[in-house]
Amino acid sequence: MHPKARDVLLSALDSGWADPARLHHEGRTARLLLDNARAVLAEGLGVRADELFLTTSGTAAIHTGLLAVTAARRRVGDVVVHSAVEHSAVLHAAAAAGTPTEVPVDARGRVDLDAFAHQVQQPGVAVAALQSANHEVATRQPIVEAAEFCAKAGVPLFVDGAASIAHDVVPAGWSALTASAHKWGGPAGVGLLAVRKGTRLAPAWPVDEREDGLSPGHPNVPAALAAAAALQARLSEADELNKQHRTWIDELRHRVAADIPDVEVVGDPDDRLPHVLTFSCLYVDGEALVTALDAAGFSISSGSACTASTLRPSHVLAAMGVLTHGNVRVSLGRTSTHDEVDRFATVLPGIVQRIRAEVGM
Amino acid sequence: MTLDCRGMLCPLPVIKLAQAIPDLAIGDTITVLADDPAAATDIPAWCRMRSQELVSAIDDRYVVRRLT
């Protein structure tokens, strides 16, 4: 968590514990704090405060938002057009909301724009969902162009911005945008759903007076304040940090490709998020690699099947047609240092060589 | 030549394929049976990375031709 978010969270546990829907003194204080958090978060996202809803996670923002936008368009149809590499929360919500139609991606993970435009123009399309950038391989999606096709077809564009917010700029043109506070150093349990005025919503579940019925129940005011403090602090550091991350990931990308034989570095090398790198090592078991890197002091993610509870490889890597085993995803944070990047690039070739040798490769 | 990798998890089917390839004459094919879902992506990806030809991939049956 961002240190500024931690400070705010601790003090808000005392000042913002009450239910902001109550009229007593503590309730009104909590209400003021929540309004304040919403104003700061809205400014960070570039939206009006009355366009922003707070949910209990990024996943909840996607589930709630995609279902509500789809339900409001039921007279038009229930087709949800989405790229093949959306976050699983989008895939699950699309299946629950209506009839999903998947649009393929190229080998770098970028959506096929012609196919996307074609699907959006079909009759019966309620909404189109496209992430701002891919959460696993960092490739940016063509949001500007997708928004133009959607506007022409009169279809709302739903953008999952979780991977980008505070790390990268999300282009305008969307009807709904979601984000997750823990991605910028805020606490877990805070999601954002921004909905542009004029976009209709029909909550598809029992509603209460909270967040226009989009997030029922007593909100976590201290966590919302901490999320706002973290976003403000992270955005003020963004220029410097994001430039640094972009340079370090470039260096890591080149060193991994140069120093390890039979490795596939995936995602777009340039048109990408600044802080994420993903690659796959032939003949290497993903779980063995995660464990070995953990022992060397690196916490990394993997899209390999053996590291997933489902025993299926990442649907993102599969849709791109790139190697799914021996997969490593490196994400840099605000406290990452160049020394760590250098040490990672230095120890990795030996670890890969050792795991390969164990299976006779 | 047929390699039965059913029941094996990736990367094992790809490792077995890579180890079997040197025993093949250039131009010959090998059939790999693999039911791990990851094989559907990883066997074609291996062919692309190692410059070998994926002749066909139908259900759990992959036919690969040695080119180099």
Image (cartoon, helix red, strand yellow):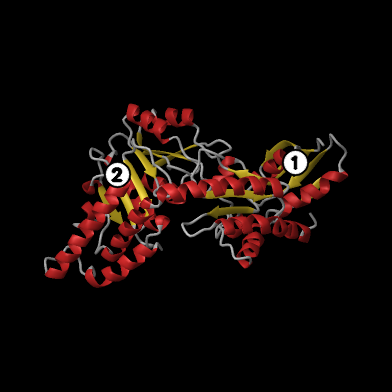
Q: Which residue is mark 1?
A: B50
Q: In the displayed structure, would residue A197 be above or below residue A328?
A: above
Does residue A15 sit above or below B19 in this rendering?
below
Q: Quadrant of the C terminus of chain A?
A: bottom right
Residue occupying image coordinates x 82% and y 48%: B20
Using the image as rendered, state which of residue A53 and residue A245 is in the foreground. A245
In the rendered structure, the residue with mark 1 lies on which chain? B
Q: Chain of mark 2?
A: A
Q: At label 2, which amino acid type do we have?
A: Gly
Q: Secondary structure at mark 1?
A: loop
Decide if residue A159 is in sight here.
yes
Look at the picture and state if A317 lies above or below A124.
below
Horizontal side of residue A64 vs A338, given as left or right = left
Say which of A306 and A16 sits in front: A16
Q: Is residue A299 above or below residue A124?
A: below
Residue occupying image coordinates x 35% and y 56%:
A233
- In the rendered image, which residue does mark 2 sit on? A46
The quadrant where residue A16 appears: bottom left
- The quarter holding residue A355 reads bottom right
Q: Is residue A204 visible in this depiction of the protein?
A: no
The answer as to whether the residues below labels 1 and 2 share one chain is no
Q: Secondary structure at mark 2?
A: loop
Q: Residue at x 24, y 52 (%)?
A: A39
On the rendered image, what quadrant is the N terminus of chain A found in?
bottom left
Cα separation, mark 1 vs mark 2, equals: 47 Å
Task: Judge left or right: residue A95 versus residue A316.
Answer: left
Where residue A319 appears, x then y in whole percent?
A: 56, 42
Residue found farthest to the bottom:
A14
Q: Which mark is residue A234?
A: none
Q: Amino acid at mark 1?
A: Arg
Q: Nearer the viewer, mark 1 or mark 2?
A: 2
